[in-house]
Amino acid sequence: MISVPLPILPIIETLSRHRITPILVGGYVRDALIGHTGTDLDFELYGVTSLDELERILKPFGKLNAVGKSFGVLKLSYQGFSIDFSPPRTESKQASGHKGFEIAFMRGTDFTAAARRRDFTINAIGYNPLDKTLLDPFGGRGDLSKKRLACVNPETFIEDPLRLLRAVQFAARFDLKCDEKLLSLCRIMIEKGALQELPKERIFEEFKKLLLSPKPSVGLSLLKAMGGLSFFSPLEKLETTLQDPGSHPEGDVWTHTLMCVDEMARLRTGDSKRDTVLMFAALLHDIAKPVTTFICDGKINAPRHAEEGALIAEIWLSRITEEKSLIEAVLPLVRHHGTPRKFYQNHSPDTEILRLSTKVAIADLILVARADYFGRSLPSVPDDFKAGKWLYERAQALGVLHFPPEPLLRGRDLVALGLSPSETFKTILDAAYAAQINLEFTTPAEACEWLNFYLEKG
């Protein structure tokens, strides 16, 4: 039996009084079967004569959002829950792409017929809260227990290209193995260019779900098995790019990347926005190794792969998202992912750490560097990431763990000296900040002394 949240029961009772049978469907049922609870609920309603009627019935529970009304969906926010209500419907392919469907309501149908339109068997399970019965016409519960990802209807599955990426992120989220028939379908879809039909915002959202899953390597491995890596080029070149066996016993860059993203998943902060940045940085940190790696005297090297990687990562990310702030946060992490170990090995002075803080968020950089360090098949696992610990302590002591230092000299200080605002202000303030980073002064009083000397000299 699925546990329905107590606040939802009055809604169910109201629908029942109006001879409407609400069937709980989708992710809430699937997740409940594996012991997870959520606040998003989807009800498929049998016996509804019109959406206008449904609006009148549900009006006592709050204002309904009719944004999805043209698709047959009404949304309600109620006591901390987000609830979707919709009659059973069909979606027939009318044009290419993810949105090329015509929606039609299915009147006088049953749950089995309605569930046949769903993507995966694990998403085609329903629960009737009135008689407390589980509806599972396509064996989704068994597939969940067997950790098997299978489609409901091969004929309709191939109509929606987004289902390719949904398969990948579901595999990663629930650690599922793709059914061979489904895998074959996905390969055919990709060969026919299905991924090219998707808008970048949908690709990004599904890829983000994949990277924020408990084990991203499962989904990335499935994407590779489908033949989909070439769409996300140059990821497909990582497997054939070897690494130095001394520092990377796991071998190729692809294997290391899979290990790195799984390690990064264990280090996530719980802040979705920040974790998205960290996960993309982990995925792309060695993206330039295929074009920078060479063998000399039997040794494998990839000089400047971090710097080149930032350039390639920018192009890669721009193909799947317009989120400039995300891209701007990821690129410095790619560019500097090797810096913590270099600084530690070189005993870099505080000035270098201060300078680094103006280029990248050091706390995030340490996490990416740690994932890179532990994301490999080391013969013996070290107790700790010493370089990360060292840099963390130094950056914290300097007050630049998360942000660069605030300028000790500002425009108002120049005005206080009797200077009139002009274009030279920026030149002076830039020079002052560079001097501050170089530890030529550390207090406001010292900053004023430096400024007087600078102005006299100038």
Image (cartoon, rainbow, N blue to C red):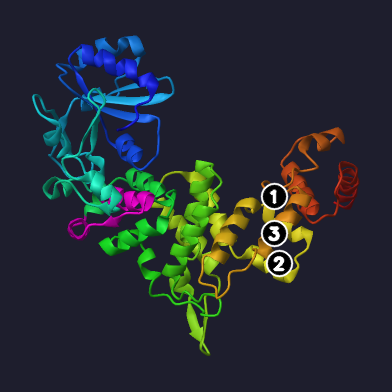
234 w.r.t. 332: above or below: below
On the image, the x and y values in percent for residue 244 come to 52, 79
Nearer the viewer's eye, disc 3 or disc 1? 3
On the image, the x and y values in percent for residue 186 come to 21, 56
On the image, the x and y values in percent for residue 51 come to 20, 17
Q: Few, some or many C-alpha atoms within 10 Å of disc 2 (few <14, some 14-19, many ≥20)?
A: some
Is tag 2's residue or tag 3's residue first in the polypeptide sequence? Answer: 2
Is tag 3's residue or tag 1's residue first in the polypeptide sequence? Answer: 3
Q: Quadrant of the N terminus?
A: top left
* Distance Cα–Cα, label 2 vs label 3: 10 Å
User: Which residue is tagged 2?
Assistant: 344
| Front-most of residues 352 and 227 | 227
Q: Quadrant of residue 137?
A: top left
Would residue 294 appear left or right of 48 to someone viewing this image?
A: right
**Residue 361 is at least partly visible in this image:** no
Which residue is found at the position 24% from the left and 16% from the top? 15
For mark 1, give the secondary structure: loop
Which residue is found at the position 74% from the left and 55% from the top? 393
Q: Few, some or many C-alpha atoms within 10 Å of disc 1 (few <14, some 14-19, many ≥20)?
A: many
Which residue is found at the position 14% from the left and 50% from the top? 154
Q: In the displayed image of the protein, which residue is found farthest to the bottom?
A: 297
Which residue is found at the position 54% from the left and 45% from the top? 274
User: Which residue is tagged 1?
Assistant: 401
For mark 2, give the secondary structure: helix
* Distance Cα–Cα, label 3 vs label 1: 12 Å
Q: Main secondary structure of the magenta part?
A: helix
295 w.r.t. 5: above or below: below
User: Which residue is tagged 3?
Assistant: 389
On the image, the x and y values in percent for residue 412 come to 79, 34
Span of residues in magenta: 164-193
